Image (cartoon, grey):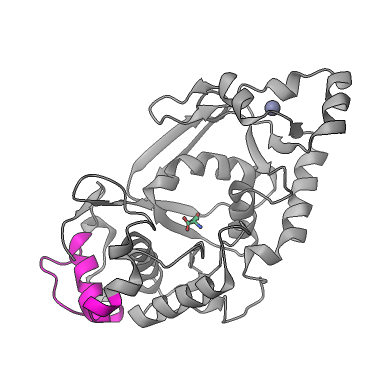
Amino acid sequence: MVKGRFAPSPSGRMHLGNLCSGLLAWLSVRSQGGTMLLRMEDLDPDRCKEEYAVQVARDLEWLGLDWDEGYGAGGPNGPYRQSERSDIYAAAFETLRGAGLVYPCYCTRAERLAVSAPHPGEGEAVYGGLCRRRAPEELAELAATRRPAWRVAVSDREISFVDGLQGPVRENLVQDCGDFIIRRSDGVYAYQLAVTVDDGLMGVTEVVRGRDLLASTPRQLWLLEELGLSAPAYTHVPLLLSSDGRRLSKRDGDLDLSVLREKKSNRELTGFLACLCGLLPSPEPLSPTELIPLFSWQKVKRESLFVTSC
Ligand code: GLU
Ligand code: ZN
């Protein structure tokens, strides 16, 4: 049984890019007769609010994207707000710790940058493992003054998978990624751990999301394996860029749903998105349900999509 998911972060109103990934995730599931799940990724208490979550759900409904399980719908794998799943993440954290893979990191931001090698191609930093090599006395001293973040020690292995749209991907975790944080120093579990545990325990079989998360997938595949959870298939869809080449973000207020809903009907917006990502030759208005028979991954563009007007 196919099960896909929407996993929005309710840190503001959704924008066109979130909606485009959501539409493709939904079309993929619905065209296979699968189950759709909605999970609120509200881990960050400083940025996420319940009122935004309510609005995200309303905006999805407005567009005509429904879900069978999750936030507001219930189901056997809840709770469906990450902020209510700390016990579940704690158990996974202990499993990894029991396997000897977790260690405290006391580095300040400046130290982290100083001991990091640049990530080939992505401007991301690879953590060099400084805290893994600290002597016990030094660790005891640091523990008395600072609260650590927690990292997993990755295996020196190559992780490979075939992305549904981007093709084969290969990464050596030590060289390309390094030991990564699974729990912040304020106690909040990190995205990488939470998303992996949730996709695994909620029985998600396919993940469709923005290409900005392609680089996270090897980490998540490795964590799934270490936790004994089965891995979904991954498809990373193109990001939407503004005409000057910047990635759309929540800061592009003119393309968020509050403005778009004033300018366009739900069918107009669906048609516009479908045309943008390659499913329709012209932006004729239609509903997500009417798009199902026209959907095929073969038609969907792989490269970034420029949004010139909407
Ligand atoms: N919550 C993430 C976001 O809104 C998506 C995570 C995922 O799809 O894995 O960017
Ligand atoms: Zn450190």
Relative to the observer, which residue lies in front, 10 or 180? 10
- Above or below, 225 against 111 in this view is below
Magenta stretch?
Answer: 261-290
- Above or below, 247 against 37 in this view is above
From the viewer's perspective, tell me whether residue 217 is left or right of residue 296. Answer: right
Relative to the observer, which residue lies in front, 46 or 172? 46
Relative to the observer, which residue lies in front, 241 or 101? 241
Question: Residue 114: percent from the left, percent from the top?
Answer: 58, 19
Location of residue 79 (image quadrant): bottom right
Relative to the observer, which residue lies in front, 98 or 210? 210
The magenta stretch spans residue 292: no
- Above or below, 44 against 171 in this view is below
Q: Tell me the residue at 29%/72% (across/down).
A: 259
From the viewer's perspective, tell me whether residue 126 is left or right of residue 186. Answer: left
Q: Tell me the residue at 67%/75% (across/down).
A: 76
From the viewer's perspective, tell me whether residue 309 is left or right of residue 207. Answer: left
Location of residue 291 (image quadrant): bottom left
Q: Residue furthest left?
A: 282
Question: Residue 30: percent from the left, percent from the top?
Answer: 38, 74
Question: Residue 201: percent from the left, percent from the top?
Answer: 65, 61
Q: Is residue 186 visible?
A: yes
Q: Tell me the residue at 24%/66% (across/down).
A: 273
Location of residue 88 (image quadrant): bottom right
Q: Tell me the residue at 58%/72% (across/down).
A: 50
The magenta stretch spans residue 278: yes
- Above or below, 227 against 88 in this view is above
Question: Residue 206: percent from the left, percent from the top?
Answer: 47, 59
Quarter of the image for the C terminus: give it: bottom left
